[in-house]
Amino acid sequence: MSSLNESRAQKMRLPLFTQKRQLEVPTPSEKDWSKDDEESYVFKDPHQELDSLPQPYRMINKLVNLLFDRAWEIIEEREALREVELSRIRPTIYPPILENKLSKRPRCLAVSQDYVFIAGAKGFSIYSLHDAKQIYVYEKFKAEVMSIWATDLGNETLMAPVDEMGVLRLFYLCKEGLFFIKTINEVDDTNKQTICVKMDISHGGDFAAFLIQGAGDTWLDVYKLPKEAWVKEVEHPQLAVNPKKKPKQLQADGSSCCLVEFKLSIPVHVMKIKPPKPITGSLFKSPLEVFAKMEGCYGLGSGQNHIIKDSQWEQHTAIFNATYRKYLDGEWEEEPLSMATFHFLFHSCLTVMPAEVKSPPGVPSVLGVHWTGRHNFFLYSLNRNLKDRVGTRLPELGTLGSDPEGVWPCAAPIALSQLSDCGSYLVLACEDGVLTLWDLAEGLPLGVIALPEVCSCQSIHFLKHFLVHEGRNVYPEGPAKSQTTCVVLCSDSSLHLVTASGARGTTVSVLVERPVKHPEEALCAVAPVPTLPGMVLTFCRNGSVLLLDVARPHVVCAFALPGPYHLAVPWKPVFAVSSQHPFFLLRGDHPDGDSDTPSSVFYFNFNSCSLLEDASNSCFIPQADLDAAGFPQELSLERRCEGFFQKRFQKLENKVKEKEHWTRLRRYSLFLQRESIRK
């Protein structure tokens, strides 16, 4: 019995095709053999073949092989990345030139003229930009300062800090001292306290706008700033509101700043703008009734005046809900309050103004506003009914001038907008990725471009017009007409350069691609450097700060904080770039610190960098050199016409000479033919 079992077990261990069975001669089938089988066919010894593993060992074997294969792929990928890192050209790194040590981590910085404004726990501090010496400390607030706006008014500076409670105060800084002007959103009842979300001051400091939120509502307050009266009241204190109080001389680390107790003239309230009302059904029966209700062309295009009935809106809503029911079911988050983006615009043929209102040159006359989720860009006249309110010391908030004078409808909701520093160019970025650039001075659109489908606009920054002359970026003397450049940071961390010109159209190029293999190098913030033509600062997620030349493009150099300081929040760095001097400031934090631990503000000077000495010292080029270099876009209209006619005349002259040359050749060939016939 045992011998029978042993022979049976031995028989089972043999391969199947070695067992005894009747052999058959197969029919010739060489024509049906596939080439793959023929190539992979190898004669093997049947006794050396391995039987397949039973379960679960076969699954374990596959998992182990998969683990080894994946580990080998990771090793090869890391080796490739290491080789790329070693082969990369690392930029020159420059350290800061000054360090300003602070007792607490500041939330924000601001730079204006020669002053640096740093937020504090109960106020703010003013320092010198050149030597970091403290000039003055103001600590009379009840909460920490969260943001600071500082605007150049010529020889003076208008500063507006906002504390943690959302209270905004206006200060006037000049050589005579620091003057407190007004608390914009001050209320007697703390339960009715409003917060200032955003503000903007016009170029030159003639107007200011503040976005206020409170009691579930949002509105925009616009003020006229009496800067001429401020200058007179500072020079002649008897003209001020309460000139009997004498100024106090306060000392601050060897330097002094005069804090003046009397207040200056209060800004005049111009108008209060609220978000547009939702479109509802209309009672109008014909288009004539719609136009009869409108005053002239004001508000045309806003969509508020129409002839759509309530029943039509209800039918449209029912169809929409029935079509997208599966997407609408479920809990919905509460819709946030509407936010506004606003810009002060100069008068042009694109901005509609009342005929009886005339604005002086160099002073903004129109306020452009767009709200989140809205398609329209509204235009409001800043001088409408203002003459009736001049001289009012404490105006009450009202709805004066709340109706727009003009409306620019867009094909998609406006997501972002930006105005150039000179006020001549405006860009509107819609949610569908389409950017429209406008030349407000000339009254024409410069171009319409579309970003890649996967990109959405995160921030836009205009660059001062520059040229590449003899391998250097330079600013041409005189204003540039109908040509501008801006950088666009997208949500996927890619950076694009948009160049628009009325004659050559609009071009888009990629400066920094999306970091797919290096996600730590994703761009978080971009800031133009006005003192360096065609250069921007880029802040990466890994904490690196790079100076990028957009004309090449390439990284010029890098800036680093001294150890052990680093950027605590690299995706939201706290920095400030001077528009008049080659400086930028960056906050450095301790590795194990929090908001209450000491930190420092570091000063970086572009002139101290050996690679940037020539770029900052000689960044302007005269018009005569431009004419000699042959930049047609920088020539005047007369010179362009002269050059065009000269080229045209030269072409005609060359054609005439070419025709005479062929005529002579033809005559000579005929002469040769005649001579050959005679012979």
Image (cartoon, rainbow, N blue to C red):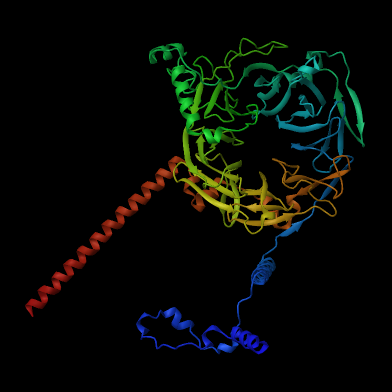
**Camera-nearest residue between 613 and 194:** 194
Q: Is residue 58 above or below residue 284?
A: below
- Residue 462 visible in the displayed image: no
Q: Quadrant of the N terminus?
A: bottom right
Q: Is residue 69 above or below residue 177?
A: below
Q: Position of residue 327 (x, y in %)?
A: 55, 36
**Camera-nearest residue between 554 and 42:** 42
- Residue 544 visible in the displayed image: yes
Q: As drawn, is 244 to the left or to the right of 502? A: right
Residue 331 lies in what quarter of the image? top right
Residue 665 lies in what quarter of the image? bottom left
Q: Position of residue 271 (x, y in %)?
A: 63, 17
Residue at (83% x, 48% y) in the render: 98
Residue 381 lies in what quarter of the image? top right
Q: Is residue 210 above or below residue 68?
A: above
Q: Position of residue 550 (x, y in %)?
A: 60, 52
**Camera-nearest residue between 210 and 576:** 210
Residue at (64% x, 85% y) in the render: 5
Q: As drawn, is 212 to the left or to the right of 503? A: right
Residue at (87% x, 29% y) in the render: 139
The image shows a total of numbered marks equal to 0
Q: Quadrant of the C terminus?
A: bottom left
Q: Position of residue 72 (x, y in %)?
A: 67, 71
**Camera-nearest residue between 296 and 278:** 278
